[in-house]
Amino acid sequence: MSRIEAITSRDNPALQRLRKLAADPAGYRKTGTIWMEGDHLLRAARTRGWTPALVVATEAAMARPELAELAQTAPRVLVVSASLFQGLSGLESPALMGAEYALPASAPLQPAVDTLVLDRLQDAGNVGAILRSAAAFGVRQVLALKGTAALWSPKVVRAGQGAHFALQLHEGLQPAELEVLTLPLIATSSHTEHALGRVELPRPCAWVMGHEGQGVSDALMARCQLKLRIPQPGGEESLNVAAAAAICLYESFRQRDLTGR
């Protein structure tokens, strides 16, 4: 049975704590908890067996039976006005509810499963979109090198739209830690004759996606066993890293699907 509390003060200690958590991209690393906003994310978490520690729901949400039922999956529910909830929200049009979850425990790196390596990607929207593609096309784990946007920040979680729950995520890694991988690393490069879609890809493999402006570091590129260009018949190198990742991961899936391996 959930404990439901009506909160009317902006100075409520729980709301003050959550405001700090929602505003700090890396705040979860200090608190060990994650802020997620919107009933879509809460439903996705519930489907994957996650239980929130605390839900904050607007009065409008609690007036809707399906959202009230979702809110009461937490042991504690704070019911607030729309204006109070807006103080927690990172959206221009705030959602009706949000929740705090425990940060999942880290698991050992898996050396031989389909993997995505993020090399110092900065933009939270790009990172979240890439995680969505990874989850959609069967990647098992994501390894984010130090300097990459915080994977569990509220902006990345929102952009991921539930992808986080399907992936094993590791962040803050040093390049040397990739040595545990026993599968080939692949990167994209415009300076190669080998084109994606015309080369048989190793299975499983680890795709490496690099910094939006600088690309994959020279040292990491040198460790990649295969470098491929993405054909762009329009004549412009116009793909951003999230689009490039989606194309590469789809091609891996397509080849795997054709062979059934």
Image: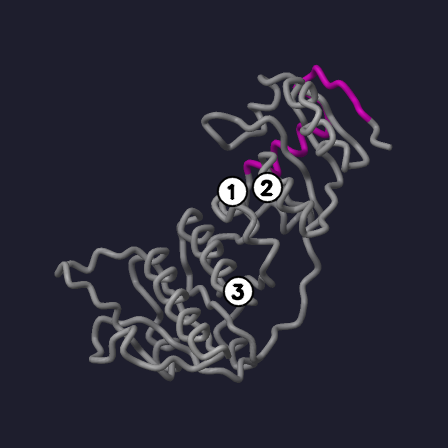
Task: Please state if 54 lies on the left or on the right of 231 as rendered.
Answer: right
Q: Nearer the N terminus, badge 1 or badge 2?
A: 2
- Mark 2, Cα crowd under 10 Å, few <14 / some 14-19 / many 20+, is many
Chain part drawn in magenta: 4-23
Q: x and y percent of residue 145 in the render?
A: 48, 65
> Residue, x 19% and y 60% (percent of image)?
237
Task: Please state if 244 lies on the left or on the right of 39 as rendered.
Answer: left
Task: Please state if 104 lies on the left or on the right of 208 as rendered.
Answer: right
Between the residue at mark 1 and the residue at mark 2, the CA separation in whole angstroms equals 8 Å
Is mark 1 in CB contact (under 8 Å) with mark 2?
Answer: yes
Q: Which residue is mark 2?
A: 41
Q: Which residue is mark 1?
A: 158
Q: x and y percent of residue 197 in the render?
A: 29, 73
Q: Label 2 is placed on what type of residue?
A: Leu
Q: Which residue is mark 3?
A: 142
Residue 247 lies, with reference to residue 56, above or below; the image says below
Of the pair 227 and 223, the residue shown nearer to us: 227
Q: Which color scheme is applied?
A: one colour
